[in-house]
Image (cartoon, rainbow, N blue to C red):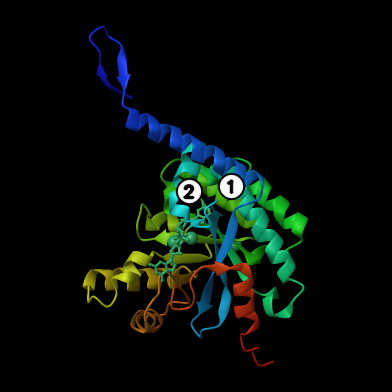
Amino acid sequence: SVKQAGRNGVAFFDPEMEAAVRQRHQLQLELARAIDTGALQLYLQPQVDAGGRLLGAEALVRWPREDGTLMAPGSFIPLAEETGLIVPLGNAVLQQAAALLQRWQSEAALAGLRLSVNVSARQFRDPQLAEHVRQVIEQHRIPPQLLELEITESVFLGDLEAARRTLQALDALGVSLALDDFGTGYSSLAYLAELPFDTIKIDQRFVARLGQHSRQDEAIITTIIALGRQLQMQVLAEGVETEDQERYLLHHGCHGLQGYRYGRPMPVGQFEALARAQPTPPA
Ligand code: C2E
Ligand code: MG
Ligand code: MG
Ligand code: MG
């Protein structure tokens, strides 16, 4: 952008800003290539039930960089959203998740596990989304309910009716639907009751403040759990790190737990080893 106009009206550009623009463009090209070549990796974070049994995992995307580091989604999902790359990125994640679920179906220790993937607001508004989900389920012949789509409240900011139709189309495919980061945004109880969500995920910032004796945060958490139970939805808490947080959540009837206490996001092979090491439930 123009920092100052010269004497004769010629615009001078801020070299720092220009460098930033060029760098961003370069990152965009590299991300597009990583999507195309299948270089993005899914890390899996365990989700457990109230008895500590493994329910499944949330898939969290990582971008392996040339220097050997893994870039966290917070550093490239916003760029993907802004540039529209989120649609092919999200489709690639869905494809990988479905392939994984397919492979799990041939092994008893893995066959019942659910896999959740994040769907960003822009991807949710892609008119092809439901058709794409239908195709991956069909191609990989997976039980649809084992695939869960996590959607944030931000999708309801725009055209609520369109969002409702998309959710209904997804629900009709038999996939599970979770409302991610609940409590942070724009939710209205009036519409939540009518939408086909199976699970409400309590945002980790409320969980993080548990134990700081914040009456407000405790009230929010207990209210969300009670609400979910009233609406016959599962309630899963994110970001559970301590025994105290776990005890509080379970005491108030939370169904599912996710957080460092049960495992950090990990490579697929490591998650599968964890699942194989679970005690088999009595027949
Ligand atoms: P999210 O869906 O709310 O995912 C939970 C985030 O919390 C993950 O960060 C996870 O590593 C982190 N987390 C889990 N347990 C704990 C804990 O006990 N303590 C703390 N402090 N943090 C915990 P991550 O992997 O960096 O992902 C960040 C966000 O990026 C996700 O938030 C999600 O919104 C987005 N994201 C990740 N993968 C994808 C994807 O494939 N597509 C889209 N559209 N978004 C994605
Ligand atoms: Mg999520
Ligand atoms: Mg359903
Ligand atoms: Mg979340």
Q: Position of residue 6 (x, y in %)?
A: 25, 13
The residue under label 2 is which amino acid type? Answer: Ile
Name the quadrant containing residue 277: bottom right
Residue at (58% x, 52% y) in the render: 168
**Residue where numbered disc 1 is placed:** 89
The image quarter containing residue 126 is: top right
| Quadrant housing the N terminus | top left
**Which of the two discs, 2 and 1, labels the residue nearer the N terminus?**
2
**Residue type marked 1:** Leu
The residue lying furthest to the front in this view is 67
User: Which of the four quarters of the rendered structure image does ligand 3 lie in?
Assistant: bottom right
Viewer-side residue, 44 vs 52: 44
The residue positioned 61% from the left and 85% from the top of the image is: 278
From the viewer's perspective, tell me whether residue 13 is left or right of residue 30: left
- The vertical placement of 191 against 248, above or below, is above
Asked which secondary structure carries label 1, the reply is helix
Q: Quadrant of the C terminus?
A: bottom right
- Vertical order, 13 against 280 (above or below): above
- Tell me, yes or no, if residue 143 can be seen here: no
Q: CA distance from mark 2 to mark 1?
A: 9 Å
Position of residue 231 measured from the top left corner of the image (x, y, whole percent): 46, 67
Q: Residue at x 64, y 48 (%)?
A: 130
Circle 2 residue = 77
Residue 120, position as x, y percentages in the image: 50, 49
- Please name the residue shown 64% across and 71% down the image: 269
